[in-house]
Every structure is written in structure tokens, then in C-alpha cells.
Image: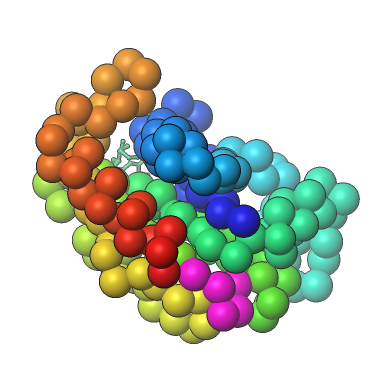
Amino acid sequence: MITIVASTNRPGSSTLKIAKYYQRQLAKRGVEANVLSLMDLPREIAFSDLYGNRSAEFEPVQQLVTATDRFIFIIPEYNGSFPGILKVFIDACNFPESFYDKKAALVGISSGKYGNIRGVEHFTGVCHYVNLHVHPMRLHIPAINKDIDAEGNPQSEDTIKFINQQLDRFIKM
Ligand SMILES: Cc1cc2nc3c(=O)[nH]c(=O)nc-3n(C[C@H](O)[C@H](O)[C@H](O)COP(=O)(O)O)c2cc1C
């Protein structure tokens, strides 16, 4: 099962729009995928679901993570890295079985020029630590605010081409 993680809890994020775009592109290939938005995490997660605690609200999220064998992380650039809420989410999930020996595709997005190159690199290190195998084609989408239309579809030919390439390769991985 594939789960696309929209890796921020910012309301109205471009990240969630791109996650839904990935879901539509997979559907065109006959592949079903869930979208997990970090907006839907428990509001108290930093206190209710770390260090051996587990809330009833997080249970369905953990069940989804456990049932997933391929993740696509859409990761916005926040202060030169990935969002803190993404690390809190990883720390809250059961260790090591949540991600161990599973597969991930990583996509960086930013309003700036570099498409979260650094944040994707930082998150790759976390993936390696939890033994989550990262697909070598990591995508970086810069100037996201100018690239997507009102429906959340990317407009640049390069963005569309590279997303298609990444998905075609990832589903064969
Ligand atoms: C807390 C925060 C920090 C940010 N830091 C950066 C940054 O370092 N570089 C950058 O290009 N954009 C930065 N941005 C802008 C995001 O890249 C932009 O909002 C983009 O749309 C992706 O994030 P979103 O999914 O929240 O919309 C930042 C945004 C927020 C909310």
C-alpha cells in the first residue's frame, strides 16, 4: 500500500495540493494511494504520543503507517530544512517497525529557488537511520507558488515530466 505524506500541518499548504496531485497521477496508472496530511495529527501529539505514550487519536495514523510499504513524502522547505512536525511524526510512530525495510520517494518543494535540496538531504539521513530505503530520484520543485494553478496542478513542463518519471520508477522499485 502506498501512502503520500503531506509533511506539514500548515493550513492551505501547497504541500497538500502536490500530495493530491501525486495521488491523481497514481490513480491514472491504476495505483491507489492514501494521502496522510500532518494537519490531521493529534493537536497534542508532542505530549500525547512521544516517549511511550499513545493516544486513541493517533491509533488510526499508526495503523495506516503500519499497513504502508511505500511512502511518498512531499516536504516543504521551512527555514532551510524539513518541517519540525515531520520529525515529531516520525518520532511518534512505533520504532523500528513503522519504516524498517520499507521504501520511500522524496519530493522537496519551496517558494524559493532550490526546492528544499537541504531539507530533503536532512530527511534522507533520518530515513537511513530508520532503515527506510530512499529512491535515488529525489525531486525538487522550486517556486511552487508560481508553478501550481488553482486546482493544484503543476504548470511547468519540467515539473510534470519529472513527477511522471519519478512515479514510473518508484512503482517499479
Ligand atoms: C515556517 C516557514 C519557513 C519557511 N522557510 C522557507 C525557506 O527556508 N526557504 C524557502 O524557499 N521557503 C520557505 N518557506 C516558504 C515555503 O517554501 C512555502 O510556503 C511553500 O509554499 C511550501 O510550503 P507550504 O506547503 O507550507 O505551502 C517557509 C514557510 C514557512 C511556513
**Foreground residue, 49 or 60?**
60
Q: Quadrant of the C terminus?
A: bottom left
Q: Give the overall secondary structure of the magenta segment.
A: loop
Q: Where is residue 34 in the image (x, y as percent from the top left)?
A: 59, 43
Q: Position of residue 32 (x, y in %)?
A: 57, 43
Name the quadrant containing residue 157. top left
- Most distant residue in the front direction: 30
Say whether residue 150 is visible: yes
Q: Who's the residue at 52% across and 45% down the image?
A: 31
- 31 displayed left or right of 164: right
Q: Who's the residue at 64% across and 60% down the image?
A: 68
Name the quadrant containing residue 55. bottom right
Q: In which quarter of the image is the N terminus?
A: bottom right
| Numbered-mark total | 0
Question: Which stretch appears magenta?
Answer: 99-103
In the picture shown, does residue 22 fall above or below 13?
below
**Foreground residue, 87 or 138?**
138
**Foreground residue, 65 or 116?**
65
Q: Where is residue 49 in the image (x, y as percent from the top left)?
A: 75, 60
- Most distant residue in the top direction: 150
Give the quarter the ligand 1 occupies: top left
Q: Who's the residue at 45% across and 76% down the image?
A: 133
Q: Position of residue 59 (x, y in %)?
A: 81, 54
